[in-house]
């Protein structure tokens, strides 16, 4: 399920799709609090109810957040909004 432009996930407003794969969809979004562009990765609704895949998505967010390297994006936020699980980089 693609998110529509203008959809809000917490403080993030979806601007455009960037890509999609087996474990998620990625969008360019605007952080309305800090007035900056961010990337939002969401867990698609088709697999949202699978506890194993939810756990895998959450582990992925924690693993990326633990990295500190100039060639790896920093995770700024993780959350759930309107039933959509996401993390923000």
Image (cartoon, grey):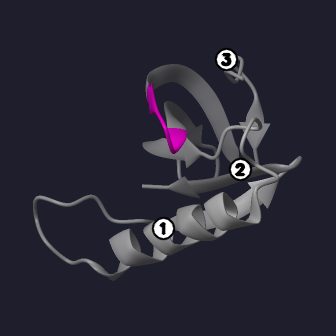
Residue 45: name its quadrant: top right
Q: Secondary structure at mark 3?
A: loop
33 with respect to 16 (left or right): right
Residue displayed at 52% across by 19% down: 16
Label 3: how many Cα within 10 Å (few below 14, some 14–19, many 20+): some
Going from N to C along the chain, the mark reached first, 3 or 2, is 3
Residue that mark 2 sits on = 11
Asked whether the residues under the numbered discs 3 and 2 touch, taking CB atoms below 8 Å apart as contact, a structural biologist would say no
Q: Position of residue 20 (x, y in %)?
A: 46, 28
Q: Secondary structure at mark 2?
A: loop
Residue that mark 3 sits on = 5
- Residue sticking out furthest to the left: 70
Q: Position of residue 62 (x, y in %)?
A: 46, 77
Residue displayed at 76% across by 37% down: 8
Up/down of 56 relative to 31, above or below: below
Residue displayed at 45% across by 67% down: 60
Up/down of 18 relative to 34, above or below: above
61 with respect to 79 (left or right): left
User: Magenta segment range?
Assistant: 20-24
| Residue 23 belongs to magenta span | yes
Gap in Å between the C-alphas at discs 3 and 2? 14 Å
Residue that mark 1 sits on = 61
Going from N to C along the chain, the mark reached first, 3 or 1, is 3
Q: Secondary structure at mark 1?
A: helix
66 with respect to 21 (left or right): left
Label 2: how many Cα within 10 Å (few below 14, some 14–19, many 20+): few
Q: Position of residue 57 (x, y in %)?
A: 56, 61
Gap in Å between the C-alphas at discs 2 and 1? 18 Å
Q: Nearer the viewer, mark 3 or mark 1?
A: 1
């Amino acid at each position: 399920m693609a998110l529509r432009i203008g959809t809000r996930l917490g403080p993030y407003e979806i601007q455009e799709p960037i890509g999609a794969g087996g474990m998620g969809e990625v969008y360019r979004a605007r952080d309305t609090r800090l007035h900056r562009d961010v990337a939002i990765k969401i867990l698609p609704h088709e697999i949202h109810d699978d506890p194993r895949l939810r756990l895998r998505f959450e582990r992925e967010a924690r693993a990326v957040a633990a990295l500190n390297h100039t060639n790896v994006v920093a995770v700024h936020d993780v959350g759930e909004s309107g039933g959509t699980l996401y993390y923000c980089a």
